[in-house]
Image (cartoon, helix red, strand yellow):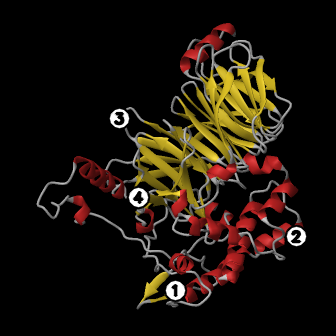
Amino acid sequence: MGEVRKLQKKLRQIENLEIKVSLNPEERFKISKKEELRCRLAELQLQLCGLQRTPGIREADMKRAGEGAPEDLPSQAPPSSKIPKGHEEARPGLPATQRATGGSVKTTCGQRAQNVRVMSHHGRGNSEDCPERDDRGQEPAQEDVELTTLKTFWQKAKFRLRLLEGHNDIITCVLVVDNLVVSGSRDTTVKVWHVPTATEHKNLGGHTGGVTCLSAPPPEYCKKLAWSLSLSDNERFILSGSADCNVKIWALSIGQCVKSLYTFNAVTALCFVPEADGYIITGSDGGKVQAWSWRTFDNCQSINAHQEAVTSIQSQGPLVFSGSSDGGVSVWENRCTERDPLRLLHGWSGQVTGCGGGRLALSPRGDQVLLAYGWAWIKILHWITGAVSKLTNHSCITGVTDCVHQTAGLLIGSCYDVTNGESTLNLFSMPQCHYLASLTWPRAPRMLCFATWTTGSGSHRWVSGGRDLVVWEELPSSAKHRGDIIVKRNIQLESPLESEGDTEDDEDTDEHLDDYDDDDVGGGDEDYARSTGSWFRCILQ
């Protein structure tokens, strides 16, 4: 198991190298070893599948490594009209599906290693489609019926994918404004997209550093600013934060920057608080949280809130939630005053959340905050009491959760496996966090940011960003189009929420993963983060 963990760590470090803006020859050589390392890891995992119990190997490790082999997945890729020709060849190391025949699994070095896990596909005729009576002959509870209906719906979901091409670097943030998709990238640009035609609507250039975060004030606050600028009452504005220390305010209809705020620090996160006259809240790579008046654009408050980079800021009514790469989470109350509007309500360190050492993304809901922190779980923090529980988002410790999003009773978590390059979206029902289904497609890229909206008819529209910018358009169940996505179920994600006290084995495994020195790839994750600066750790917002 020592070699397995060492290979897993190497692959995780290589994934970090790949998302750097520029690479030196030594780093390029290390990246070229990725497929070789994945091949070797696949061989070791297959060997472990045949072991029953070996002294020195923990039972939990054996269970994770040898649950079973994946079922065959459909091989249909998105239509060529949706994914342009040549795009497939541009991404190195396309994944291949392992196939099990007669109880054995054959893997070649030309194929990507697949995580060894059990998948079960449910379709029409499955017992879940028709709720049965319990042992006492009684009808199932209404909650169970609703959950079964949800599972059935998502097991039959169809989406068409549209690739939006134009950025020449990683997409770090996305949002939706009036059915327009807005994206920010490390290429320093903000782009506005017309979804029906999948074309670029506006290119907002002006930042001199990578764009790290986006936010959109509500229409009533846009109207106030438009009036002061003698623009149309229907004008919509967006905010963009950048590593160049600026927050820019853009008017979408004219595609121009109407105001720029210099913060003296690389901006790594921001949000708009629609309370009183409105406030812009920003976070920096040094851990500072600042408040800016929407009426005067003056700096109202500066707080040294976190020890490391602020990687996520979200608002919920008058409350503001900030998360840091050190794992800390702070909850602020907006008192709607001209000076010092933010008052700290609760602050929880990385020792409490267990999320230190990576980019922390958060999504608040009531008295809970959902946390994605670069490992295989989504954590749920009760921000009043400090209680923490875990929701499994990947069946192996090599899974990476980059973003978590809530919409219309759904919890959506992105999942990327560093050992095989497989990327999925996992869907859970809220608020109980029951697992529903997983969505993916062949050669799906790593998804680092996510946004959702609905059409007038109630259909889902999603957009995911990372190496690619992809729009997901829900198709009606009666549509003849088969859809571009693959819907599958992972039974290992159906476990209930676990409190932190029940998951010591998993945390211990995480620690072991970082115990090995890596001469082939370089130092540990912390050494790598120090060498690239805190901006790198928080740029993937």
Query: In this picture, is 137 found above or below 293?
Result: below
- Residue situated in front as seen by the camera: 129 or 160: 129
Q: Identify the amino acid type marked 3.
A: Ser
Quadrant of the rendering where the N terminus is positioned: bottom right
Under circle 2, the secondary element is helix
Query: In this picture, is 184 found above or below 436?
Result: above
Q: Which of marks 1 and 3 is nearer the N terminus?
A: 1
Q: Nearer the viewer, mark 2 or mark 4?
A: 4
Q: Quadrant of residue 33?
A: bottom right
Checking the image for residue 26, the label placed there is 2
Under circle 1, the secondary element is helix
Determine the CA span between mark 2 and mark 4: 40 Å
Q: Identify the amino acid type marked 2.
A: Glu
Under circle 4, the secondary element is strand
Checking the image for residue 437, the label placed there is 4
| Residue on which disc 3 sits | 457
**Residue in view at x 74 percent, y 12 percent:** 296
